[in-house]
Amino acid sequence: MDTANNTAQRKAFLSRVADQFRELADEIGEPYKADAWAAKGDAVLSISREGQEDDALRVVVRLVDDGDGMEEKLVLLFECNREVTRRLGLGWNRSAPDVAAGLDSRADHVDDGSAYAIGKVTQGLRADVLAVLKGEPGLVARVSPAFARAGSVRPRSEPGPAGDVAGDNGERAACGRREPAARRAADEPATPLPGPDIGLLQAAIGELATKGGLKAENVFGGFIKAAASPGALKQGDAVAYAQGALLELGLFYAAFLRSNGMRASDLGMEGGALRNAVVKAKAAFFEQDEAVRWQVAREMVTGMRLYYAEALASRGVPEAESKEMLKAVFGRDGAIANDAIAILAEPEPAKRGSSLRRLLGRNARE
């Protein structure tokens, strides 16, 4: 954000986040009290049990100055019974937070281990809030039907939860606030949950290969189809799909390095001679250094895990079941990466006539 307007921009952004929290709070009824506000540099969603002082669930969003090299950094803390169970870190160094989008603003960076995907924070947050509250006795019957469908916002044509009743003046009381009944338009349809973000997989392929025409829907085609199917994946499936992606990437790098006169600028990448030297070095390191291949494999596996998590959420899989399914497939992501890079390993002397080695050798001669 521009330094001169930093305070005003931050205040506007947090006010928008508080509005998004209020929309979510409006879906929660008795025996809980939900509220949202922005104050003292924080936007807060608080859900407490009636008659108890402590929050059952609390979500805090703040913009911080110490942003790991970012010009602006957002931190989200998801607290259950005073314990932080989920975190999100978003950073901006080339762009700035989108006030209108609030939590769903695009960002230049997301911290490792973040609970939500860029651009889909409110969707994931709704699902997590629902998952927590569904485990509380007596609450499920008081949550509106549409909100109970994978955490989506209920269409305002549906009846609200208990305690959400119309007043004499045409307004409704909900969680301590009063809003015009006109907002509950009978013809407003429910908003379906979007599918998983294929950008998570495209980013794992890397800029050079993306510019060169490798598309995630092709490189990860089998994995994408499997993630959308009703069956559960296994760790061996993840290894196989990662191997296929790494093989595609390895062949692309080999072709790029062995194509006489091919430059990064020929693929539409900007930066001139220096940029060309950097991308060629990266491709060469991938071929020659197992540690580099392992790092690329880890990034691919991480992208696959995040994509699979979103796929399960879009299928309406309950959070507890989703966690178990993710753990079964990606619980040993380091081992998956190790197994995946084996397809590009230097062959043993007795196997140097392998078809892959002959292909790469022929590319080198050409």
Image: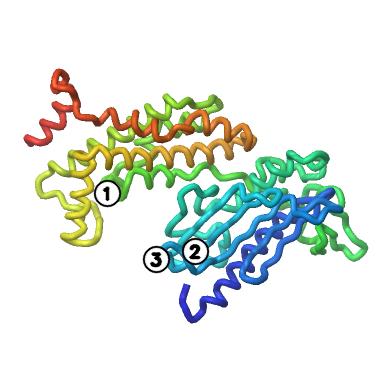
Q: Nearer the viewer, residue 217 or 307?
A: 307
Residue 73 badge: 2
Q: Nearer the viewer, residue 298 or 311?
A: 298
Q: Is residue 310 above or below residue 54?
A: above
Which sits earlier in the primary sequence, circle 3 or circle 2? 2
Decide which of tag 3 and tag 1 comes sooner along the chain.
Answer: 3
Q: CA distance from mark 2 to mark 1?
A: 28 Å
Identify whether 269 is placed above or below 39.
Answer: above
Residue at the limit of the structure toward the left, as seen here: 365
| Residue placed furthest toward the top | 350
Instruction: Give the image location of residue 227, x and y in percent.
Output: 49, 32
Mark 2 vs mark 1, foreground winner is 2
Res 81 seen here: yes
Cα separation between marks 3 and 1? 20 Å
- Residue 312 x %, y %: 56, 36
The quadrant where residue 320 appears: top right
Q: Residue at x 34, y 42 (%)?
A: 215
**Residue tagged 1:** 208
Q: Report x, y in % for residue 252.
A: 23, 39
How crowded pointer 2 is (Cα within 10 Å; few <14, some 14-19, many 20+) is rated as many
Q: In the image, is 220 to the left or to the right of 347?
A: right
User: Relative to residue 319, is residue 301 drawn left or right?
Assistant: left
Q: Camera-side residue: 12 or 333?
A: 333
Residue on which the image places disc 3 = 94
Q: What is the secondary structure assignment of the residue under circle 3?
A: loop
First reached walking from the N terminus: tag 2 or tag 1:
2
Q: Are marks 3 and 1 in contact (CB under 8 Å)?
A: no
